[in-house]
Amino acid sequence: METDSDPKANPPKRQIFILSGQSNMAGRGGVIKNPHHTPNKRWNGLIPPECSPDPSILRFSAALKWEQALEPLHADIDTKKVCGVGPGMVFANAIRKSVPGELGLVPCAVGGTAIKEWARGEELYENMVKRVKESVKGDEYAEIKALLWYQGESDTSSEHDAEAYKLNMENLIHNVRQDLDSPSLPIIQVALASGFEYIEKVREAQKGINIPNVVCVDAKGLQLKEDNLHLNTEAQIKLGHMLAQSFVTVFQKSTVES
């Protein structure tokens, strides 16, 4: 006779994590200039140990199918740019042993996008919500655990956009929680490591959001590539661990394996 404690009666739920925002979430680690060929950039194909694949880590493809997660996670999502290493696989590997069952990543980030493009009704936002809903559709053993959000560089070149950022981000948080029917969905946002003239206004907005179950991880000081905009691979590894530490410490109340 099966009991409630019987793992066959209650198999571990697939833990779903949304990866969204713009290029530093999509990942540009290892993307290098390719001067003798077109296109003019390519990913170098180097996969750090922290980004190694594991059978328990899955990704939700652009075709809305679950498959084993491999770098670059956003290759079929952020299709207008060359994708490389981001923080997603590092995050997944760092929390993998403290999370029962499979771990599902839903990549949604698109490079060069402003916060207003992630407003309810806009294509990027609606596609993100659709992908997340499809990722759990018909699966009673799936649970949306958190949204990891890294975006804002595109809003730092205009004072108007920077001043509007806080309200726009707060609206996004409320909207995505409502549309996913998850009123207390954990959200970990990244305070910018790079940007343009009004970066400090956007960073101030990011760090100033005071909504339950919303926390901020500060990327300031992480090493940038030569473009002074994108995190290099080493910085993405550090960020992935920071996101994992934040999730486990704040939302899981345990420690991440070092």
Image (spheres, rainbow, N blue to C red):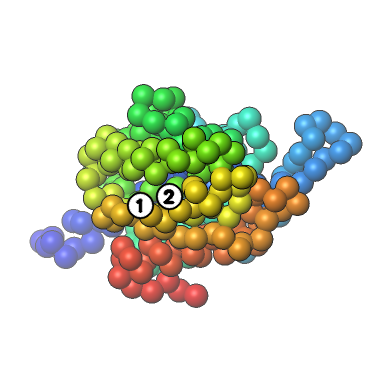
Q: What element carries label 1?
A: loop
Residue 6, given in percent of the width and then of the height, sits at 18, 63
Front residue of this view, candidates 13 and 161: 161
Front residue of this view, candidates 121 and 85: 121
Report, in whole angstroms, how far the alpha carbon at label 1 lies from the one at label 2: 6 Å
33 relative to 12 in the view: left or right: right
Residue type, mark 2 in image: Ala
Q: Is residue 134 above or below residue 230?
A: above
Front residue of this view, candidates 140 and 32: 32
Residue 106, given in percent of the width and then of the height, sits at 44, 43
Residue 247 shows up from this direction? yes
The residue wearing badge 1 is 209
Q: In percent of the image, x 62 and y 45: which residue is there?
A: 196
Q: What element carries label 2?
A: helix
Residue type, mark 1 in image: Ile
Q: In percent of the image, x 30 and y 70: which residue is there?
A: 253
Q: In the picture, residue 157 is in which quadrant?
A: top right
Q: In this view, does 89 lie above or below 165?
A: below
Front residue of this view, candidates 103 and 122: 122
Q: In which quarter of the image is the N terminus?
A: bottom left
Q: Count how many numbered circles sit on residues in the image.
A: 2
Residue 184, given in percent of the width and then of the height, sits at 24, 50
Q: Which numbered dot is residue 205?
A: 2
Decide: few, some or many residues near mark 1? Use Cα within 10 Å; few <14, some 14-19, many ≥20.
Answer: some
Residue 151, given in percent of the width and then of the height, sits at 50, 44
Q: In percent of the image, x 49 and y 36: which residue is there?
A: 161
Q: In percent of the image, x 45 and y 74: which residue is there?
A: 257
Marks 1 and 2 close (CB-CB < 8 Å): yes
